[in-house]
Image (spheres, rainbow, N blue to C red):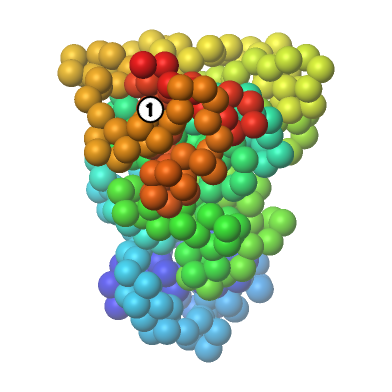
């Protein structure tokens, strides 16, 4: 058994968790030796009670390791442990780092330099546009955008990074084979093709109300800082912001109108000391990230063939998104991401009601 296989097995033992595993490794040194330890030896470790000790000692009767490894292989995923070079360094330093990261796609050294973007599932047009544009600029500058693939702000953040042809990582609150929400499966496939979709949960693990808040510590711990775009005064985004502060990460927030419920979270964070930002440049300056000379402008002036096709489909007056899709002959997801790229190149402007106008 390899060290990675042993970590997969331990990750599937009920109620073990990363904190208890760290204490076990301090005593037994390797995952393989933890699995070989006797119940009495295991119970000597602080915080490891009878139930967990019995679970580890009898793991072969409850954990089907060959089946899990086959699922990983057949899905085209891989499993990373803290011993792997591309396992995020900052994530490795938090109090309870994941035992394993199931990875669909590929992590690279670039993903060590990341910024988390989170917010409400129920959002406004303003929030979606802010999340897309700022994520586009962050990814364009070379940062990996980390978010949770949820509806709303998370989705917009991933879309913005993809439109910039940059890196983005989606952290799931379920196994890779039980992706949630299912409506974002196509988005997840795009992310996996140029970045990575990751989870600490076994391949078929279902989403639960508990897995998402626990997942958020990965989003917060992975990155140098965390941006909250829209959020109520309660919810996952503020939980994630709190976890980021616990990990000594910088928290940024986009201010919003005081009469909107989705502005309550960011505005409160700013009152409490989060850094108010009006664009990606504020974050990049704070992190001392310099945009390469060839990317000194917001985006290159040249248009790709798809960008030119979509630009040609926009009338001189306000043009509806459905009309652009029909005239261009391109699929809706491609049109949406390309329109965002054209916005960043200042060739089009989006108006309320999914209407677009040409700027040049």
Q: Residue at x 78, y 22 (%)?
A: 260
Q: Would residue 117 be visible to someone looking at this image?
A: no
The quadrant in which residue 165 appears is: top left
Q: Quadrant of residue 217?
A: top right
- The x, y position of residue 341, in whole percent, is 38, 30
Number of numbered labels in the structure image? 1
Residue at image coords 71%, 39%: 122
Q: Position of residue 52 (x, y in %)?
A: 61, 70
Residue position for label 1: 342
Is any part of residue 56 visible from this angle? yes
Name the foreground residue: 215 vs 139: 139
State the residue in front, 186 or 61.
186
Q: Position of residue 326 (x, y in %)?
A: 46, 47
Residue at the far bottom: name it: 61
Q: Is residue 74 above or below residue 233?
A: below
Horizontal side of residue 230 vs 178, given as left or right: right
Seen in the picture, residue 220 relative to 276 is either above or below; the reply is below
Residue 237 picture location, percent across and down:
65, 35
Which residue does the image show at 53% across and 55% down from the upper left?
Answer: 184
Name the image quarter holding the C terminus.
top left
Question: Taking 315 as reference, is 3 left or right?
Answer: left
Instruction: Identify the image quadrant of the N terminus.
Output: bottom left
Mark 1 is surrounded, within 10 Å at the Cα level, by few (under 14), some (14 to 19) or many (20 or more) other residues, namely many
Closer-to-camera residue (176/330): 330
């Amino acid at each position: 058994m390899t060290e990675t296989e042993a970590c997969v097995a331990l990750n599937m033992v009920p109620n073990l968790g990363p904190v208890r595993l760290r204490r076990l490794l301090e005593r037994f040194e390797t995952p393989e030796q933890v699995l070989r330890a006797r119940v009495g030896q295991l119970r000597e470790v602080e915080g490891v009670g009878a139930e967990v000790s019995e679970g580890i000692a009898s793991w072969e009767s409850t954990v089907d390791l060959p089946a899990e490894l086959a699922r990983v292989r057949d899905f085209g995923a891989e499993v990373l442990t803290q011993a792997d070079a591309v396992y995020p360094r900052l994530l490795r330093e938090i109090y309870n780092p994941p035992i394993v990261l199931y990875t669909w796609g590929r992590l690279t050294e670039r993903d060590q330099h990341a910024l988390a973007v989170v917010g409400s599932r129920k959002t406004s047009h303003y929030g979606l546009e802010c999340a897309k544009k700022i994520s586009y600029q962050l990814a364009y500058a070379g940062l990996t955008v980390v978010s949770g693939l949820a509806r709303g702000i998370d989705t917009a953040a991933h879309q913005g990074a993809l439109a910039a042809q940059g890196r983005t990582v989606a952290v799931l609150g379920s196994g890779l084979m039980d992706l949630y929400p299912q409506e974002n499966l196509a988005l997840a496939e795009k992310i996996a093709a140029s970045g990575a979709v990751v989870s600490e949960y076994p391949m078929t693990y279902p989403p639960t109300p508990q897995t998402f808040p626990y997942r958020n510590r990965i989003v917060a711990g992975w990155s140098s800082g965390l941006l909250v775009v829209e959020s109520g005064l309660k919810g996952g985004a503020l939980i994630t912001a709190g976890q980021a502060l616990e990990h000594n990460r910088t928290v940024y927030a986009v201010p919003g109108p005081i009469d909107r419920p989705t502005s309550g979270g960011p505005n409160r964070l700013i009152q409490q000391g989060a850094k108010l930002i009006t664009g990606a440049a504020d974050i990049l300056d704070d992190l001392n990230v310099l945009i390469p000379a060839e990317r000194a402008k917001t985006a290159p002036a040249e248009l790709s063939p798809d960008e030119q096709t979509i630009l040609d489909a926009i009338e001189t007056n306000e043009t509806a998104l459905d009309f652009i899709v029909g005239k261009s002959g391109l699929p809706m997801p491609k049109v949406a991401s390309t329109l965002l790229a054209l916005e960043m190149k200042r060739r089009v402007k989006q108006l309320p009601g999914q209407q677009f106008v040409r700027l040049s």
